[in-house]
Structures are given as structure tokens and as C-alpha cells.
Amino acid sequence: MADRARVRVGTRTRRSLAKLVVGVAFWAWVVLRWLNDWAGGVVVPRQQPFVPPSLFTGLANGVPDVVPFVADALGAVAFAVEFLPTLVDAFWLTIVLTGVATVLGFCIAVPLAGARVYGRLSAWLALGYVELFRGTPLLAQLFVLYYGLPWLPAFFRELPWVGAGFLPGQAVFVAILGFTLNSAAYQAEYIRGAVESVDPGQLLAARSVGLSRIQGIRFVVFPQALRYAIPGWTNELVYLIKYSSLAAFITVPELFQAAQGIASTNYRYTALFVLSGLLYLALVVTATTLMEYVGNAVSVPGVSGTGSR
Amino acid sequence: MSADDLLRVDDLHKRFGDEEVLKGVSFEMAPQDVQVLIGPSGSGKSTLLRCVNRLTEYEQGEITLDGTPTSEMDENDLRRQVGMVFQDFNLFAHRTAKGNVTLGLRQVLGLSKEEADSRAMAQLDQVGLADQADSYPAELSGGQKQRVGIARALAMDPKLLLFDEPTSALDPELIGEVLGVMRDLADQGMTMLCVTHEMGFARQAATDIMFLDGGQIVEHGPPDTLFEDPERERTGQFLERLTSLHGDDG
């Protein structure tokens, strides 16, 4: 028994070590690409690969025809090496869209969830908000914000810092606003479920030592509820990473639009969507791994979203 | 009834919907009194306690704490002065034993972190749990949890402590440690209103026992009188049954 347990722990450690090595290598490469391109191409010209793709096509040409797959695989690598630099540049915006919208959405979701559970009039307002943003297509919401309310993109365009230097143009800000409003509705529902799962005796005990209702919610209910909410909340993060591709439809040059843009010139749609899909996958795996780490870091005995309660 | 009563409950009525749970309850407690409230389930014992610290609002009657009607006090201020210990502990699950005690000290009394910590440690020491200060509720036994619950209520320096069946959720072998702490408190002169069926504790520590039945106090007197010579047959029967079930642990 003991031996088997040790073997299992060993395998798990090795696996997470492998995951760590792959993850660090991937992100180091991504960050190097960004730095190179933002600095105007210090190591290689902007959007040019670190290793020339001709290296792999050359190798592929050297493989005899009788050997199956190898030449094709080398050709695929050459293709990836050629186009990944452009995709990775756009990948930056995908990360910004999801990251900023998730954080801002969380700031709205916490009071929304509180209103849903503890409010009277505000409970109805919060319910209306949640149903509106969960009940209509995200793409429609983005269209309304970008094309339906012309003053909104105009407002962002007029801000002096929008589109200046490193900062992107107004479409990105409208997209962030749309994702924030939408994600807040979903996050609020995950958090509301968690708040309702906290034993009512907890708030009762808080009130019994003289804490006000707000203090009881703030210091006793929410710290527990947010821990319970982490797994569901991670799910929303994962969704948003992929739904950020909808920003392409309001002209945001993020990952999906970059893939589409390249494909429209060379018609290799499948290959480019597979490549961009791999980048989305890498981001999702990274996000879930990080959230798992956060969940473990904040869990206390008896109060964790991942383990047994 | 005298002017220096710490707690006075006068003609208290409470209904849940159509059902009147308390039908005119009146009693007084002098400082340092330990009153034990007994009665069959559904007789309104817990409701009565919750009316005292206004966790439940009531329709009619007046409750006075130290000369001030509680209805005129700020409810948070009232609860700071009236501690409560729950049947199922209700320890803050995400905070350590020490963190459970410090929360009220920090947020309600506004003590600094250092002051709150040292007061919490003193309070935990008093209930014999200084060595468990950094344990989370899930890591404590039932008896330990309840002692932390008592420390949490005590730390606010209350004038009155309410105990709502503090040992009913405990395994029999853990009851003694909680009753021990309660007896120590009684000896130190803490004013306590206890819903409990621990007759050993009632006999030794109570100044008075109140028998609540059907929403009214049907008998009220010192333990010796109630145990040896109850006025009503119903009281005698109930006490006999309780003693046979819960009499040995004190």
C-alpha cells in the first residue's frame, strides 16, 4: 500500500514538473516575442520567426519519399514557425481582453451577488441585469455597444490616451466594456450560488457578537463564499478566454482576427484555426492551473472549493 | 422585581404566523444570576433567548437590560453587551480559533490587532484552548469548538451570556469539558441565561430554574424547590425524565 502510494505521488510530481517546464518554456517564448516586437524588432524583425522556416522545409526536402509522415510533419512545423509570430502578437490582445474584463467583471459581480441574496429592491435590479446579459447573445451585445451606440466608440476615440503609443484603439475598449458587463452577470451567478451555500448560522453568529449585517456579510459570509466559488468562477474565466474571439467582429485585432486575416491571403483556414486554437488551449490550461494554485493557496481546513468541505 | 435587575422581561409575546410561541413571559435576573430554562421542545426556549438579544423581533412586551429598554438600544450595541453561545457552535469556518475571537474585538470594539490578539489569547486560555489558537474549526472537536464559541462571546465583555442548548450537539464524553467552563463562569459571577437539559449543571450552578411550557413560564424557583417539591405535577414528571437522561454528567 505504502509503496503504491509513493509511486502515485512520484508520478504526479513528475507530471506537474513536466507541465511546469513546458509552461515556462512556452511563456518565455511568448514574452520574448512580445518584447522583440514592441521594441521594434531588436533580435529579429517584427513578426519574423526566431528560426527561419526554410530550415524545416529544407529538412523536409531531404527526407526520402518512401518515409511516411515525417516530411508532412516538418512542413507543418515550418508553417507554424512562419505564422506563429503574427498570431502571438495578436494573442496579447486576447489576454488583455479576458484578463481586464474578468477582473472588472468580478468587481461588479461581487456587489451584484450580494444584492441578489440580501437586497430587496436591489435584488430585483440585480436579477434584471443578470437576465439581460445572460439571456441575450454576447455578439449582439457587442454589436449594440459598437455599432448601435455610435457615441460610445466616439467617446473612447476622443480620450487622449486611446490609440496613443502602445494603447490600442477604441474598439478594444468597447470590447472590454462589453465583456466586463457580460462576464459580471455570469460571475455574479456563480458567486450567488456560493453565498447561498454558506450556512445561515454564520451570519447569525456574526450578528450575535455585534457585527452589523454589512460587516457580517463582508467579514464572514463572503470570505467563505468566494472560496467556494473558485471552481465555478474558473469555468467562467475559461469561457471568456474563448468568447473573446467575438471581439474580432467589432474590428478588434485579436488572435481570431489575426488567424482569419492570414487565412484570407493564403487560404490555409484549417491550419491557421488549429494554430490559433492551440494558443487558446495554452491560455486555458495556464488559467486553470493558476486558479487551481490560487484555490489551494487560499483554502483553509473545512473551507475550500476544491477539496471536501 | 427590584431596581437593580440586570435583565427584566415583561409580558413578552411572540408569534410565528398564526402560532403564538410566547404567550406573556415575564421574569427578572439579578446580576450574577444563573438561570436555567427548561421545557419540552417547541415550548419557545430558543425563541425567548433570541428575543433577548433581538436576533428575533417580538410583537408585544418589554425587555430591559440594565435599566434601558432594549428596543431603544442600537441592536449591534445590545448584542455586544449580550453574548450568545449556539447549539451548533456556528464558529466562523474560515477563521482560526483566535480569529473567531478577534473578529468582534477588531470590528465591533475597534481594538488594534495587538490588543485583540492578546485579549483573544487570554480568553482562549481561560477556556483551556490556548494551544489550539491557530487551529481552524474543522480541526477541533465538538467540545473544543463550543469552548471557542464561549471564548468568542466572553471576549466582548458582555453583561449577560445566553446559552442555547450548548451541549445538545455534543458527544456525551465531550459534554463535561463545556459544562466545566460554564461552571467556572458561574463561579466567577457571570450572569447567565441557559437553555439546557443538563440537570447536574442546573442543580449545582443555577440560582433559579424556569420551566417553560406552552409559551408560558409554568414554574420558576430555586433548583432544590423544583427538584424536591414542584408545585405542579407536570414539572415533576418533566424533571424526572430529564434527570434520568441527563443527570449524571454534571
Image: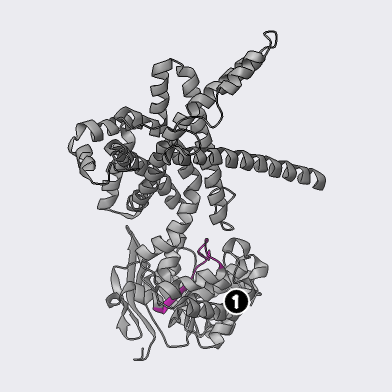
Q: Chain of mark 1?
A: B
Magenta segment includes B167: no
Q: Residue B47: name its quadrant.
A: bottom left
Name the residue beneath numbered marker 1. B179
Q: Which of the pair B245/B65 is nearer the observer?
A: B65
Amino acid carrying label 1: it is Leu
- Quick check: can you spot residue B197? no
Q: Which of the pair A98/B205 is nearer the observer?
A: A98
Can you say whether B239 is above or below A303 in the image? below
Tell me residue A68's x, y (percent): 67, 12
Magenta segment includes B83: yes
Q: Which of the pair A208/A161 is nearer the observer?
A: A161
**What residue appears at the point 53 percent right and 76 percent down from the top-left corner?**
B151
**Which residues, given as a range, are shown in magenta?**
B81-96
Tell me residue A221's x, y (percent): 44, 58
Left or right, A216 with reference to A12: left
Can you say whether A262 is above or below A301 in the image? above
Left or right, A33 with reference to B6: right
Tell me residue B226's x, y (percent): 52, 81
**What residue appears at the point 32 percent right and 68 percent down from the top-left corner?**
B58
* Quadrant of the frame with the N terminus of chain A: top right
Q: Which element is circle 1 on? A: helix
- Quick check: can you spot residue B242? yes
Q: Residue B201: name its quadrant.
A: bottom right
**What residue appears at the point 45 percent right and 31 percent down from the top-left corner?**
A47
